[in-house]
Amino acid sequence: MAFRVHRLIFVLGIAPAGALLAGCGAPGLPAKATVTLIDRKCEIVETISNRVRDPRGNTVKLEAQQTTRSTGECKSVDEWDKLRKQRSKDVQGTATVHVDYQAPQDGSSHSGTLTFTGREDEFYKLNAGDSIDIVVAPDDPAKIRKS
């Protein structure tokens, strides 16, 4: 009985990994890219909740919310420096990251762009000059994606 249970666990442990690998498609070629420029567009949303008196005259307190929005390039938004460190407010936005890289297929130089959202760490951490891992399409060295 113990042999059967052990064998069943072994078979079940291998099957999911094989299934995952079978559905991957072309994985691409890893490469390093250098960040040349970052265009960040932000909308910072802050919601403040307060308890207020019921305007109908009851003694009941109601929950009221006030939402403020700051929109623009992230560096032009007043609280960007604090926000990068804390992330205490909701950030909705995108960072278009321009990169230069050498294609692993033939060593040719290329430029490309990657997009990150306010939910990704790279949105806050990347700076011009940083090195970033990318994946280059094996059939087209001009096509890249995040690693």
Image (cartoon, helix red, strand yellow):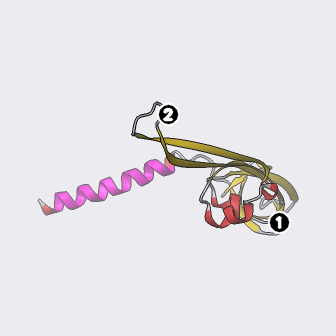
The quarter holding residue 9 reads bottom left
15 magenta-colored: yes
Quick check: marks 1 and 2 in contact, CB under 8 Å? no
**Location of residue 79 in the rendering, given as x and y in whole percent from the top left corner:** 73, 60
Judged left or right of residue 57, residue 11 is left
**Label ID, residue 55:** 2
Q: Which image quadrant: the N terminus?
A: bottom left
**Location of residue 90 in the rendering, given as x and y in whole percent from the top left corner:** 61, 51
Describe the element under mark 1 as helix, strand or loop. loop
Q: Amino acid at mark 2?
A: Pro
Of labels 1 and 2, earlier in sequence is 2
Q: Amino acid at mark 1?
A: Ala
First to last magenta residue range: 3-21
| Above/below status of 60 relative to 36 | above
**Residue at x-position 67% and y-position 61%:** 83
Between circles 1 and 2, the one closer to the viewer is 2
